[in-house]
Amino acid sequence: MIPRRVTILGGTGFVGRALAARLTAHGAAVRAASRQAHMADLPAGVEPFTANVRDTEQVRSAVSGAEAVVYLPGLVQARGAHVFRALHVEAPRQCAELYRRAGGRHFVFVSALGVRRDAPAMADRTKAEGEAAVREVLPEAVVVRPSLVFGVGDHFVTATARMLRTLPVYPLIGGGRTRVQPVHVDDLAHALAALIEHSGAGGQIYEIGGPQIFTLRAMVEMIRAAAETRCWLPALPYPASMLLAAALELLPNPPLIRDQVRLLKTDKIVGGEHSTLRDLGISPHRLEDALPEIVAAALRRTAKTG
Ligand SMILES: NC(=O)c1ccc[n+]([C@@H]2O[C@H](COP(=O)([O-])OP(=O)(O)OC[C@H]3O[C@@H](n4cnc5c(N)ncnc54)[C@H](OP(=O)(O)O)[C@@H]3O)[C@@H](O)[C@H]2O)c1
């Protein structure tokens, strides 16, 4: 049975909203906590709760009474290692600790595929550290590592479709050779809900990928076809990508930073050592089937705002 009260830290983001909708539909009372929760467009019945995961008192209130807590806040862009560490290591450790002290045990930490203590990117290294920190405080915590997540309103497909429609050239970092195993947000939400439901998963790591592995080049080519554009996709080797990102970092809101280039140096695919969607009895959706709807929504919104 799904726990009656669930707090989703970072519950107003892309993954959080899908999870909140699923849990609410199954009868749970869901609290979606984030810094701007009251401005978020949440599924009906979900309680918005304003809390910064870096604020002890706000976290204490957010997790109070929760039978399960999911930690979602994460970054791929930050200025400085301390910002990654704050959100990926210190905050989840403190959230798990406060929840444990309140008597809770059911904690799910959402990490990412490709994380390792010695990964090239700071984003990946700090997530690996965060996994260890949470499990040290709460050994029963479950760690979930998704690959790239797709769905209407997602980050990657939506932004890529818009760029391919507006730019004549879209350089593929490292030649687009990084391998990904994109997973539908509903399949990830299904997995998270199942892990919340079955306390037997305690202490395990789940690697969540879709049914197919693509190179980033293949994925971008599929998005380009769905967006019906002819944008040129030249390969940009890693050294040139690092130079480009270093130059873009001088902008107030850079579209690319060097740590994102480093992120692409490791594949984001299920490794085989840990549990997967199959262990949860979930048959994942294919990217091709969802792509037309995601791209159409992305381009519709661009047309409205542009
Ligand atoms: N999307 C993907 O393709 C993907 C792939 C692999 C792993 N993941 C991981 O999955 C997790 C969720 O991803 P997502 O795509 O849902 O991210 P998202 O859309 O960016 O959502 C992030 C959420 O965290 C909240 N948040 C950020 N900083 C916070 C803070 N200091 N205190 C409280 N809340 C904070 C944001 O709301 P406010 O800004 O209002 O605070 C938002 O609700 C992340 O950890 C991400 O690394 C995602």
Image (cartoon, rainbow, N blue to C red):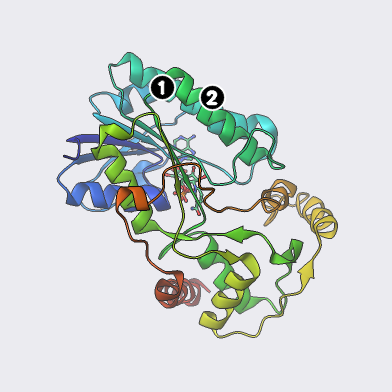
The quadrant where residue 137 appears: top left
Residue 119 or residue 40, whichever sits in front: 119
Nearer the observer, disc 1 or disc 2?
1
First-in-chain label (1 vs 2): 2
Q: Is mark 1 within 8 Å of ligand 1?
A: no
Q: Position of residue 267 (x, y in %)?
A: 63, 53
Q: Residue at x 40, y 65 (%)?
A: 152
Q: Residue furthest front?
A: 273
- Dot 2 lies on which element? helix
Q: Is residue 111 left or right of residue 139?
A: right
Between the residue at mark 1 and the residue at mark 2, the CA separation in whole angstroms equals 16 Å
Q: Identify residue type, mark 2.
A: Glu
Q: Position of residue 22 (x, y in %)?
A: 25, 51
Q: In what quadrant of the picture does the N terminus appear?
A: top left
Q: Position of residue 86 (x, y in %)?
A: 57, 28
Task: Please state the horizontal and vertical placement of residue 103, each as a whole percent of the image.
Answer: 27, 16
User: Can I make out residue 54 in this image?
Assistant: no
The amino acid type found where label 1 is placed reads: Pro
User: Is 103 on the left or on the right of 291, as rendered?
Assistant: left
Q: Which mark is on residue 139?
A: 1
Say if 160 sits above or below 5 in the image: below
Q: Is residue 189 above or below residue 223?
A: above
Quarter occupied by residue 28: top left
Q: Residue at x 57, y 35 (%)?
A: 127
Q: Which residue is mark 2?
A: 90
Q: Residues within 10 Å of mark 2 (few under 14, many from 20)?
A: many
Residue at 26 percent across and 53 percent down: it is 43
Say which quarter of the image contains residue 180.
bottom right
Numbered disc 1: secondary structure: loop
